[in-house]
C-alpha cells in the first residue's frame, strides 16, 4: 500500500479523506478483481463523496441550531 500513497491524486485529499480512501482501496483490492490503479481511483471517488456528505451534514446541523435560536 506504500506505493499507492505516492499517487498524486491521494496527496490532494485531506488527511481524513485520504485515510478513508486508502482503507476503501484496500477493501476493493481484497474483494474485487481490479487493478490497484482502478481500486485507488474508485476509492478516491467514494471517499470524496463521503467527505462532501460529512461537510453538508455539519453545515445543516449548524444552520438548524442557528434557526432554533432565532
Image: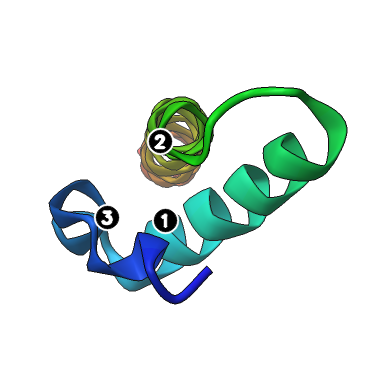
Quadrant of residue 18 in the image? bottom left
Secondary structure type for disc 1:
helix
User: In the image, what residue occupies the spot 59% across and 45% down?
Assistant: 25
Q: Residue 53, position in %: x, y?
A: 48, 30
Give the structural element (helix, strand or loop) at label 2.
Answer: helix
Q: Is residue 7 left or right of residue 69?
A: left
Q: Few, some or many C-alpha atoms within 10 Å of disc 2 (few <14, some 14-19, many ≥20)? A: few
Structural crowding at the residue carrying mark 3, measured as other residues with C-alpha within 10 Å and reported as few (<14), some (14–19) or many (≥20): many
Q: Which mark is residue 10?
A: 3
Residue 37 is labelled as 2
Q: Is residue 58 above or below residue 14?
A: above
Please provide percent x and percent y for residue 38.
45, 26
Q: Are marks 3 and 2 in contact (CB under 8 Å)?
A: no
**Do the residues under discs 2 and 1 have CB atoms within 8 angstroms?**
no
Say left or right for 25 vs 43. right
Between 53 and 66, the one lying in front of the other is 53
Amino acid at each position: 500500500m506504500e506505493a499507492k500513497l505516492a499517487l498524486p491524486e491521494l496527496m490532494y485529499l485531506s488527511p481524513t479523506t485520504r485515510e478513508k480512501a486508502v482503507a476503501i482501496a484496500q477493501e476493493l483490492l481484497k474483494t474485487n478483481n481490479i487493478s490497484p490503479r482502478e481500486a485507488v481511483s474508485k476509492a478516491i471517488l467514494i471517499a470524496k463523496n463521503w467527505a462532501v456528505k460529512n461537510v453538508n451534514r455539519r453545515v445543516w446541523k449548524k444552520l438548524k441550531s442557528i434557526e432554533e435560536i432565532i
